[in-house]
Image (spheres, rainbow, N blue to C red):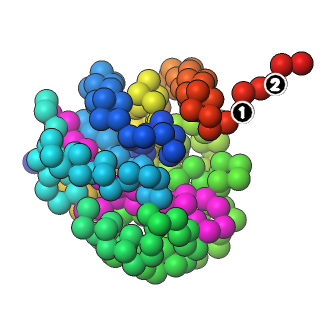
Amino acid sequence: MIYSKVRFDLHVHAKLSKPIPFSIGDLDLMLDQARRRGLDGLALTEHIHAPEYWEIYQSLRKRFPYRKGVFYLNPRLYLLNGAEITLKDGGDIIALGEMEVLSFLDRTLGLSQGYHPSLRELLDKSPQDLLLTGAHPFRPNGGLMKYAPRELKRLCALEINGRDFGLEDQVRRAAGELGLPLVGGSDAHFWPQLGIRSTLLPLSKVALSEIKHLLQEGKVEVESSDDGPLMVEICARYKQKVKEAHGLTRAPVSP
């Protein structure tokens, strides 16, 4: 049986900024927003080299049932576990997979200890059942299009990112040239931004293997919300203020 198309935000962060401590209350705000946005699920893709990365999942396992890469939240809401991996030469890859598989990759490469692999090394060392997506491929200083097409074609998809309004056509053209499907993710670090980009999936059951199969078949769509640019602006301003309050960045100097 095929469900109606379900909506997943496939790029969500658990922390406002990597150095800021994780708060389960902040994550609860994300989950509340997911329900308000009408999402069926989200992928938690915190930077794997961020402090407390593994502690976040330990907290979740104490609260929610977990099976094969999926946390089952109530009311009906699914959370996929994943990670954002920063590459040695710039750019980021979203990896979705079972916790044990991600842990194996982390131990193999030392990702949570701050090691940044090359794209080829990450592709070669990643287990086959991981789902690897090219995050924000055209973002200045964080893009992926500098890499060889033969390497990019080994990814499962390219992402239309929630913060990169105006770059959609470039991403679509690149995906077409590489023969890759597209997914949508908000890149939310703060709850109002959640769900401004999402991925529509005709899932028969919520499982990473099913999602990967749909990507291979090209049976996915990207959806964008009209308030996306406004939410990005609000969240960027809030994040800046919080980082200034934590002494993580210098406030603008008054003339």
**Helix, strand or loop under label 2:** loop
Q: Is residue 112 visible?
A: yes
Name the residue that disc number 1 marks.
Answer: 250
Mark 1 is surrounded, within 10 Å at the Cα level, by few (under 14), some (14 to 19) or many (20 or more) other residues, namely few
In the rendered image of this protein, does residue 66 appear above or below residue 14? Answer: below
Q: Which residues, given as a range, are shown in magenta?
A: 76-98
Identify residue type, mark 1: Arg
Identify residue type, mark 2: Val
Q: How many marks?
A: 2
Residue 253: give its label.
2
Rendered location of residue 42, percent (x, y): 32, 41
In the rendered image of this protein, does residue 38 appear above or below residue 88? Answer: above
Magenta span includes 97: yes
Rendered location of residue 2, percent (x, y): 15, 46
Q: Is 247 or 127 nearer to us in this picture?
A: 247
Main SS class of the magenta portion in the image: strand
* Cα distance in 3D space between marks 2 and 1: 8 Å
Task: Tell me whether the residue at label 2 lies in contact with that at label 1, contact meaning CB atoms closer than 8 angstroms.
Answer: yes
Q: Is 176 or 125 nearer to us in this picture?
A: 125
Point out the image quarter for the C terminus.
top right
Q: Residue at x 23, y 46 (%)?
A: 59
Rendered location of residue 139, percent (x, y): 66, 48
Rendered location of residue 7, percent (x, y): 31, 37
In-image side of 252 versus 125 (left or right): right
Q: Residue at x 18, y 49 (%)?
A: 61
Q: Residue at x 30, y 35 (%)?
A: 24
